[in-house]
Amino acid sequence: MYDEYFTVKAPAQRVLIIKKSKFISNVLPVDSFQKAEEYLDSLRKKYWDATHNVYAYTIGIDEEIQKFSDDGEPSGTAGKPILEIIKNKRLKNILIVVTRYFGGVLLGANGLIRAYSESAAEGINQAEIIKKIMYDIYEVKVDYNQLGRLQREISRNGMIIRDIDFSQHVLLNVCVPANSALNFKDFIMNITSGCAKIKWLYQVYM
């Protein structure tokens, strides 16, 4: 399991005109095969009159799912170049669809590869690359008089308080980077003089 990976922050679009053809690059973060296919279907419907709707996507931290399509363009000139851009930028969980409206000028194989590669790269730049980090999520129960110091020390040591529930005791959900060298339970017990109750909940990329 990777401690971190790169993807795009949010859906984005970039339009390029290359030798009279219009290339519309849609870049989307996706975390499942189903979500990627849903986006694909919606974009095919949106651009139903386009000459080509070329795409590539990778799903999974180990890129367990990879798929691309030239959608009628000469083999190897469209979908695969987009996939190579994704890999070169080390991105995961991403779908790129490049829609082409033919403008009457043939680009040739090399011209198509350049056009689809440029469209994909420009779309990624528009979407903004972000890093997602694996965190361990812990539940920590403490008394109210311990909360102030606990909040300060957690923040000072690169952790994040995700949620606080105020009831008879204070319940905090604390996010700890999975690659942290800190022993979280010992850390909390030292701050609270052994009075805290700590429970590991799950791991998540954030």
Image (cartoon, rainbow, N blue to C red):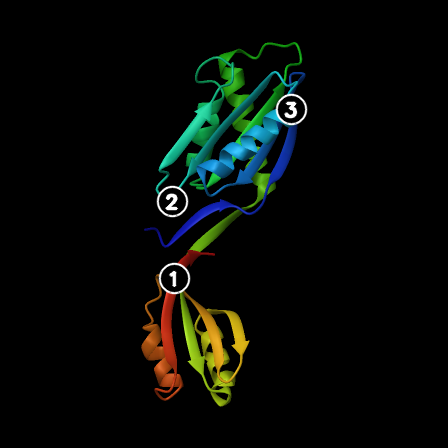
- Residue 12 is left or right of residue 90, and the answer is right
Instruction: Name the residue: 56% across, 29% down.
Output: 41
Q: Position of residue 83 (x, y in %)?
A: 45, 30
| Amino acid type, mark 2 | Ile
Instruction: Name the residue: 50% across, 83% down.
Output: 147
Residue 140 makes an appearance in the image: yes
* Real-space Cα separation, disc 1 to disc 2, in angstroms: 17 Å
Q: Which mark is residue 61?
A: 2
| Amino acid type, mark 1 | Tyr
| Amino acid type, mark 3 | Tyr
Q: Position of residue 126 (x, y in %)?
A: 61, 40
* Real-space Cα separation, disc 1 to disc 3, in angstroms: 41 Å
Instruction: Name the residue: 56% across, 34% down.
Output: 39
Give the residue at mark 3. 47
Quick check: 93 above or below 119?
Answer: below
The answer to which of marks 1 and 3 sits earlier in the sequence is 3
> Mark 2 touching mark 3, by CB under 8 A?
no
Instruction: Name the residue: 47% across, 22% down.
Output: 69
